[in-house]
Amino acid sequence: MGISFREETCNLGEMRAVRVGVYAAAMVFGLAIPAMLSAQSSSTPIQLPASGRGLQPGSVGTTQSTVNAGGQNSVNLIDSSVSIQGSYLGSVPTGTATDAVVSLSLTEALRRGLDYNLGAVSVTEGVRQARAQRLAFLSQLLPEINGNLQETVEQTNLTALGLKPSLFPKGISIPAVVGPYNYFDFRATLTQTVADFTRLHNLHAATENARAAQFAVQDTRDLIVLAVTGSYLQINAAASRVRAAEAAVRTSEATFQQASDQLRNGLNARIDVTRSQVQLQTDQQRLRALRADFDKQKLTLARIIGLPSGQAFALADDFTFSPLSDLTEADALARAKAGRADIKSAQAALHAGDEALKAARSEYMPSVSVEADYGVIGTNPAQSHGTFGVTGSVNFPIWQRPRIKADIEQAQSVVAQRTAEYADLQGRVDYEVRQEFIDLAAAADQVGLAEKNVGLARDTLTQSQDRFKAGVADTVEVVQAQQTVEQADNDLISATYEHNLAKAALARALGQAEKTIPQYLKGK
C-alpha cells in the first residue's frame, strides 16, 4: 500500500475558456492520479547463491601417496603431483612463435601465467560483474534525473468522453468536438529514494560480494603460481629422468659391447650377450617413454602460461635440493590464518549473506521516496509558463507475509551454508599447513637416503663391471647393478622433486605463493 502527497502548479492560461473544464479535469486525472500510481513499489532483497565458493573457475592442488619406485633397493617415496583443473589448464596464447628456442626462467613463466592464464581472466571478469552489481544497487539509492520534451497536437470528442450538454446548467453550451489544439511541454523529473532499508542492505551485500570477488582474485593468483611452479618442477624432474636414462643406455651399450667382444674371444656364453642386449633395449624403451613424457609436460606448461602455439623453449632454471629453515609450524599456521585470501573471501561472502538476510527482514519496514518535476508548458516557447509538481510517497506492506517469510528463509539458508563453508575452510587451511610440513620433512629425509643410495649403487655397478671384465662374474650381476643404479637415480630425482613441490605447496598454504615460492626454491 502506498500513500502519496503532491503539490503542483499548472498553466491553464493558454487554453481557451471553453476548454478550461475539460483541461482542468485532464490535468487532475492525467497528472495527479498517475503520480500516485507511480509511487515507488516495494523493493525485493538480493538473491545470493547458497555457496560462496563459486568464485573460482577451477582448482589447483597437490596430491600425495606413498609408493615404491620398484625393486627391493628402491626407497619408499611420497609420490606428489600437481592437480590442475578447470580454467587453470587454459590460457590466452599471446605473441608470435619463432624458430629460436626461448630460454624460459621460472620468473618469466610466473609472469606469463599471471597475465595470460584463463583462470586469471575468468576471475577478473567476475570482479567486474560484482562491481557492476554493486553499482546497480547503489543507483537505486541515488537520485535519478531525466529530461523530456513533448509537442502535442490533439482533437478531443467531448461527447465520447461523456460530457453531454445535459450535464451542464442551462445557458452553458459546449461543443461536441474541441480542437485541434496544440501545446508543448519541456520538463525535468527527479526521483529519489529517501528511506528504503531493503535497498540499503542490498547495497551492503553487493559491496561484500565485490570484496569477496577481489579476494578471490588474490587467491587465484596464488593458485596460478602453484600451477606454473608445479608444472615447471615436473619438467625439471622429467629432464633429470631423461638424462639419467640416457646415462643408463650408454652403460648398457658398453656392457653389451663388452659381452659381445668376450663372446667372440670365447670368454663367455651367448646368454650373457642376450641378457645384456635385453637390458639395452629395455633402457632404450624407457628412454623413449621418458622423452615423450618430457615433451608432454612442456606442452602443459606452454598451455598454462599462454606461450604461442608451437614455440620451442628450454628451462633456464634447475632447482636442486635446498633445505627450508627458519619457519616453524606454529608461525606458519598463524601466517596462513591471517593471510590466506580465500579465508578473507569466504568471510566477505558470509557478510554478504548476513546483509541479504537483513534486506529480507527489512521488507516489513516502510519505504519513503520523493518524485518531483519542473518544466515549462505552453502553445509555444514564447507563450509558456513554468510549472512544477512534488510527490512524497510512503510505501508499506499490509499482507505480504508469505512472500517475505520465504525470502527470509532463503536468506537464512544462504547464511547457514556460508557459515559452514567458512568454518570448513579454516579447518582445511590448518590441515594443509600441517600436511605440507609433514611432506617437507619426509621429502628432506628421503633426499638424504637417496643420495647415499646413489653412491652405493654406482660403486656396486663399478665393482660388477670389473668382475665381469675379469671373468669372475656374468652379466646377471652387471644387469642387476645397472637396475639398482637406475632405481637409485630415479629415487633421488623423485625425492628432490617432492621436496621442492612441498615447499611450493607450503607457500600456497600460507597464502603467499606469489611472493615466497621463488625464495623457498632457493632455500631462503
Image: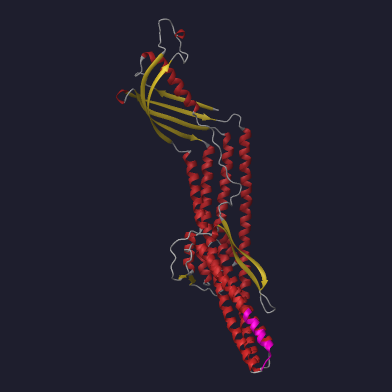
Indicate whether residue 275 is drawn in magenta. yes
Would you say residue 421 is visible in this rendering?
yes
Q: In the visual, does 99 lie left or right of 235? A: left
Residue occupying the far top of the picture: 170
Indicate whether residue 475 is drawn in magenta. no
Quarter placement of the N terminus: top right
Q: In the visual, does 37 lie left or right of 19? A: right
Along the line of sight, which residue is nearer the eye, 398 or 488? 488
Image location of residue 322, percent across then percent down: 55, 74
Along the line of sight, which residue is nearer the eye, 308 or 466? 308
Question: Magenta span covers which residues?
Answer: 267-281
> Which residue is drawn at the image coordinates 45% and 34% (left, top)?
192
> Which residue is drawn at the image coordinates 47% and 26% (left, top)?
35
Where is 434 relative to 259, above or below? above
Where is 316 relative to 128, above or below? below
Would you say residue 339 is visible in this rendering?
no
Along the line of sight, which residue is nearer the eye, 263 or 324? 263
Image location of residue 504, percent across then percent down: 56, 66
Question: What number of labels is visible?
Answer: 0
Image location of residue 93, percent across then percent down: 47, 60
State which quadrant residue 254 falls in: bottom right
Residue occupying the far front of the picture: 264
Label the magenta part by its dominant secondary structure.
helix
Where is 389 relative to 229, above or below? above
| Color theme of the render | secondary structure
Image location of residue 423, percent across then percent down: 63, 53
